[in-house]
């Protein structure tokens, strides 16, 4: 026998064996709502909005708290790094390329010029005594020539000569 023939023979037997369920469902499930139920449904959706807003506010407060804690922690780390005994400090830094720079570091009364790369620091030159004071004066904007004492300024002719020398060095070393 084929499958459709079996289905036709079984259909009358199935009709007598099963009865349709006539049980009434509760109004909340069947959708037959009364006026009070409509109000309850609308207040339930506003309750969902309140929960959403409160949850969002809690998340924002937690994020702000984490930001505040990290900000305080990094500030305390920075202060801890500056707390030293004052015998060593970075005076100036110039970036040369990515991960490469030149640093002028004060160590006691001396200045040390350091070259730093990604995995190494190399001392280039140490300035002691008068040379260190002269270099600091140059960095502060008071540019004494080699023969003059600290605290004096140079004249316009010497300044023009220095500018000319620096410009010629720049032309020779700058990439086109």
Image (spheres, rainbow, N blue to C red):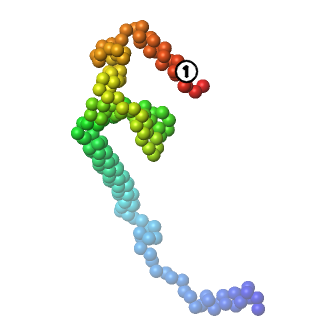
Q: Residue at x 33, y 31 (%)?
A: 111
Rendered-image quadrant of the N terminus: bottom right
Instruction: Please tell me whether residue 107 is drawn above or below residue 147 in the rendered image.
Output: below
Q: Residue at x 41, y 69 (%)?
A: 28
Instruction: Please tell me whether residue 77 is drawn above or below residue 129 in the rendered image.
Output: below
Query: Percent x, y for residue 66?
Result: 32, 50
Query: Percent x, y for residue 63?
Result: 34, 50
Query: Percent x, y for residue 26?
Result: 41, 73
> Does residue 77 appear anywhere in the picture?
yes
Instruction: Please tell me whether residue 103 is drawn above or below residue 167 in the rendered image.
Output: below
- Furthest toward the left, the residue is 85
**Where is mark 1, residue-wise?**
171
* 77 with respect to 172 (left or right): left
Using a 10 Å C-alpha cutoff, classify the residue at mark 1 as few (fewer than 14 neighbours), some (14 to 19) or many (20 or more): few
The quarter of the picture where residue 130 lies is top left
Q: Residue at x 49, y 14 (%)?
A: 164
How many dots with numbers? 1
- Between residue 142 and residue 124, name the one nearer to us: 124
Q: Residue at x 42, y 41 (%)?
A: 121
* 135 with respect to 8 (left or right): left
> Does residue 35 appear anywhere in the picture?
no
Rendered-image quadrant of the C terminus: top right
Name the secondary structure under disc 1. Answer: helix
Query: Percent x, y for residue 56?
Result: 36, 52
Instruction: Please tell me whether residue 160 is drawn above or below residue 7 in the rendered image.
Output: above
The quarter of the picture where residue 78 lies is top left
- Between residue 50 and residue 33, name the one nearer to us: 50
């Amino acid at each position: 026998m084929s499958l459709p023939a079996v289905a036709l023979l079984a259909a009358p037997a199935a009709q007598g064996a099963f009865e349709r369920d006539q049980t009434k469902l509760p109004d909340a499930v069947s959708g037959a709502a009364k006026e009070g139920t409509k109000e309850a449904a609308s207040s339930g959706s506003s309750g969902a909005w309140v929960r959403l807003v409160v949850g969002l506010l809690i998340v924002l407060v937690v994020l702000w708290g984490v930001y505040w804690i990290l900000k305080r922690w990094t500030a305390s780390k920075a202060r801890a790094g500056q707390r030293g005994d004052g015998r060593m400090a970075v005076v100036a830094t110039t970036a040369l390329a990515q991960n490469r720079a030149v640093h002028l570091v004060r160590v006691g009364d001396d200045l040390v010029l350091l070259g730093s790369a990604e995995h190494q620091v190399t001392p280039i030159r140490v300035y002691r005594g008068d040379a260190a004071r002269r270099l600091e004066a140059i960095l502060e904007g008071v540019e004494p020539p080699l023969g003059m004492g600290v605290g004096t300024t140079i004249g316009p002719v010497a300044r023009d000569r220095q500018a000319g020398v620096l410009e010629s060095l720049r032309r020779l070393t700058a990439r086109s």
